[in-house]
Amino acid sequence: MKHVVLVLVMLLPAAAAASQTTTAWDLVHPRNFDWQDRAARAQLASDLLGRIQMLAAVIPPLSAADLERIQREQGELEALGDAASPRRLGRHYLSRRYQHRVVLELVDNTQGALSCAASSERIAAEMACWARASAYLLQEDRLDLGLSVLREARMVPRDEDMPVKAQDPVVWYGEYGRGVVNHILIPYLENQAAGGAP
């Protein structure tokens, strides 16, 4: 009986490690994250995607009228060219409609890139998806401005009213983006430069 207990105790750490799930937190404070582990990368992409989807779920779609007005305003500004006043350009850029579209595009593009990373079968294609995801995640300043405008217009919940995993996207998205660069993309490129397997 003692031998059975001893074997079980010895196996517990290995079992715990095997069942450990890779999450977005591993991009901020890597535990045993191995960028070469395809399953770990897929878990990571899925966890990040779930967090982005929580934010996407509370952002209303852009109305056809708002889209038409954005397009009309942009057309007028393009026609004016250098004659467009900085004040008018700024008013358009900071408008609720325009920032609504910015946030939707950022969220949609990030979701697409993470879905691609989770499903790509070739590592080179997957890494291109990770590169796109990091580029979108690192646009935290644009996201901050857009969400601030939408919250002021009471179009999205306050940050503290969001699920825990969806809170503080302006803080964490940038950290996740840097983590993708530092813990996935750079090791992959260094491995490629050293003649490692593609």
Image (spheres, grey):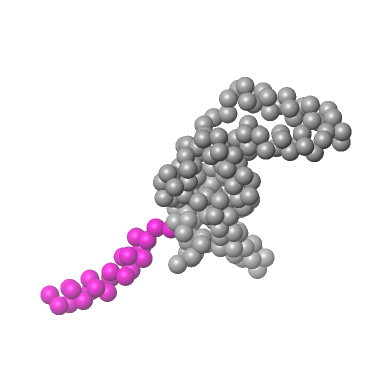
Give residue 126's position: percent from left, percent from top. Answer: 57, 50
Could you tell me which residue is drawn at 70 percent across and 37 percent down? 93
Part of the protein shown in magenta: 1-22
Left or right, 8 with reference to 44: left
Count how many numbered circles sit on residues in the image.
0
Residue 20: percent from the left, percent from the top? 37, 61
Residue drawn at (84%, 30%), measured in percent from left and top? 80
Q: In the image, is residue 46 part of the stretch drawn in magenta?
A: no
Q: Does 11 sit above or below residue 106?
A: below
- Name the main secondary structure of what is drawn in magenta: helix
Q: How far across and how far down the image is residue 105, in percent?
A: 61, 38
Relative depth, front residue between 78 and 83: 83
- Residue 98 position in % (x across, y down): 65, 34
Q: Is residue 54 left or right of residue 170?
A: left
Q: Residue at x 52, y 31 (%)?
A: 60
User: Closer to the camera, 26 or 86?
Assistant: 86
